Image (cartoon, rainbow, N blue to C red):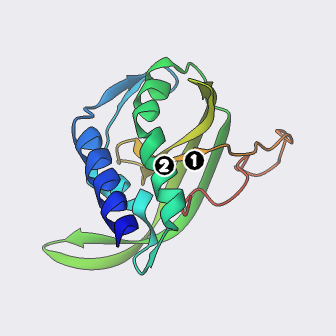
Amino acid sequence: MENDKEYQTQRDRALNIYNKMNSVFSPTLQVKITFPAESFNHIIFKNARSERERSSQLLRFKLLPLAKKLVELSTTYQEYEESFSEITLKKHKKKIKANRAIKYWGIIAILDGQKIKVILRKIGDNGFIHFWSIIPAWTTNKYRDAKFYTTMKGCPAED
């Protein structure tokens, strides 16, 4: 019971911080990066039906203020991935499934003594680039000359 109360307090505090995050200019991609509600939800849930482990959520909540700082300061990205995925869209007030190109950028740095990776995402050709996730102490892929459009280790859609 005590743990649930502490978790809820941390989650509320993180949501309050996240809601105050406005869009920020990224020198890396030369665009404004937004912080949509969907991304905060992604920090809590892996997908529509499974919640992340509480310890993982709490660590991400703690690192959340560093995400904006990293996007503002970084002048280069270290990882990139592009793929096609089926996503749910609203079209004429109806939900439909459609295949769209999804691009992910990974920005890795050590800020305030913490090694973190911020994932930025863009859906489709006309979408906006937005914050997607923050990952603590992530290992990087040393093989950078892949013939495909991926240099990420792990699964950025889930992380």
Regarding residue 154, the answer to whether it shows in the image is: yes
Q: Is residue 77 left or right of residue 36?
A: right
The residue tagged 2 is 60
Q: Is residue 63 above or below residue 26?
A: below
CB under 8 Å between discs 2 and 1: yes
- At horizontal 48% and vertical 64% (from top left) the residue drawn is 54
Where, quadrant-wise, is the C terminus in this rendering?
bottom right
**Label 2 crowd bin: few (<14), some (14–19), many (20+), radius 10 Å:** many
Is 137 situated above or below 153? above
Residue drawn at 40 percent across, 30 percent down: 68
Which residue is more in the foreground, 12 or 108? 12
70 lies above or below 7: above
The percent position of residue 80, horizontal first and vertical second, equals 64, 43
Left or right position of 149 against 65: right
Which numbered disc, 2 or 1, marks the residue that appears first in the sequence?
A: 2
Q: Which residue is mark 1?
A: 135
Q: Looking at the picture, how far across and down is residue 45, in whole percent?
A: 43, 68
Amino acid at dot 1: Ile
> Tag 2's secondary structure?
helix
Give the Cα distance between marks 2 and 1.
7 Å
